[in-house]
Image (cartoon, rainbow, N blue to C red):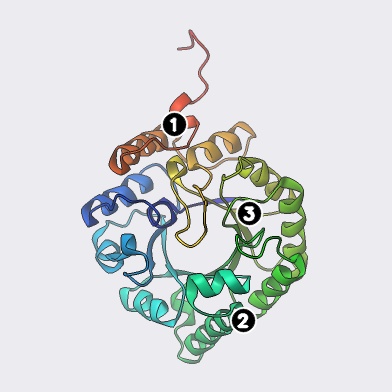
Amino acid sequence: MIAIQEVGPRDGLQNEPVRLSTAEKIAFIERLAATGLRRIEAVSFVHPERVPQMADAEAVWAGFRRASGVTYAGLVLNRRGFERARTAGVEEIHFAFGVTETFNRKNQGAAPEASFRQFAALLEEAEAAGARGRFRATLTLSVAFGCPYEGPVDEGRVVDFVRRAAEAGFDEIVLADTIGVGVPTQAARLVRRAIEATGGRVPIGVHFHNTRNTGLANVYAALEAGATVFDASVGGLGGCPFAPNATGNIATEDLVYMLEGMGVATGVDLDALIGVARWIEGKVGRRLEGMVMKAGPFRPLGAG
């Protein structure tokens, strides 16, 4: 059973020069939930001066109507973000750090090891306080396929963090190609190694950007290798403020079209999702990269 994690309201908006109002962000989340998507990364609890697009995280989190059967998540990068998320009542917390020294110091002001140890300590503290069961914890390993500053990343380093994350009690681990440099053979190999490192006990997800047009090919390879969670952003919105030349995520509607065509059920209404992609394109005021939002679903000419 696979899961699509929609990251448009967080990763999709964080790099846009146009800042949506709180009301527009709330409408965005609610429109996405109405398409049948069951997992939505809604907000990011990060420093408002560093990522001003996410400055109203608490207001957004408190403002949208919860749809039945939909899980909403918030991203955190440090203890302060975690505390904000817990105060807001977030039930699925996405921790993230970069696996390379330069990227993580630019992104989070800390060494990768320090970020990991802090996150593991937060889980331990929650466990000791009897609060661990109140939230689900996902760990995303950013720049796992390549770093804009240090180049190729040692897969052994990534896999070691995966193993330790599983031991620390994370409920899910996501391998992120933050700058879109990965290729299918690499995606398959890293997913297989991650599954082996956890003994298959922890779901492995992937987060692909389409910067070099390999995103969907990487999804296919990762799916065949055993990944079960796939991040995507409607319309192909996205980018990273701390990664030069990083462009958008794979488009959710492109992912849904491919998976459904392969016989993999997603539970998502593709027409409705295309409608949301076109709506958010109007809000951000630029042409988005998604292909299916332009071409539409496949309907032969003359078909009823």
Q: Quadrant of residue 65?
A: bottom left
The numbered mark at residue 228 is 3
Q: CA distance from mark 1 to mark 2?
A: 40 Å
Q: Is residue 236 left or right of residue 43?
A: right
Residue shown at the point (34%, 73%) measured from the top left: 89
Q: Secondary structure at mark 2?
A: helix
Looking at the image, is mark 3 or mark 2 nearer the viewer? 2
Q: Say if residue 122 shows up in the picture.
A: yes
Q: Quadrant of residue 171?
A: bottom right
First in sequence, mark 3 or 2: give its number: 2
Q: CA distance from mark 3 to mark 1?
A: 24 Å
Residue shown at the point (39%, 35%) measured from the top left: 287
Residue designated by label 1: 293
Q: Secondary structure at mark 3?
A: loop
Amino acid on which the number 2 mark rests in the picture: Glu
**Residue 211: horizontal and vertical position, in percent?**
57, 45
Q: Say if residue 296 shows up in the picture.
A: no
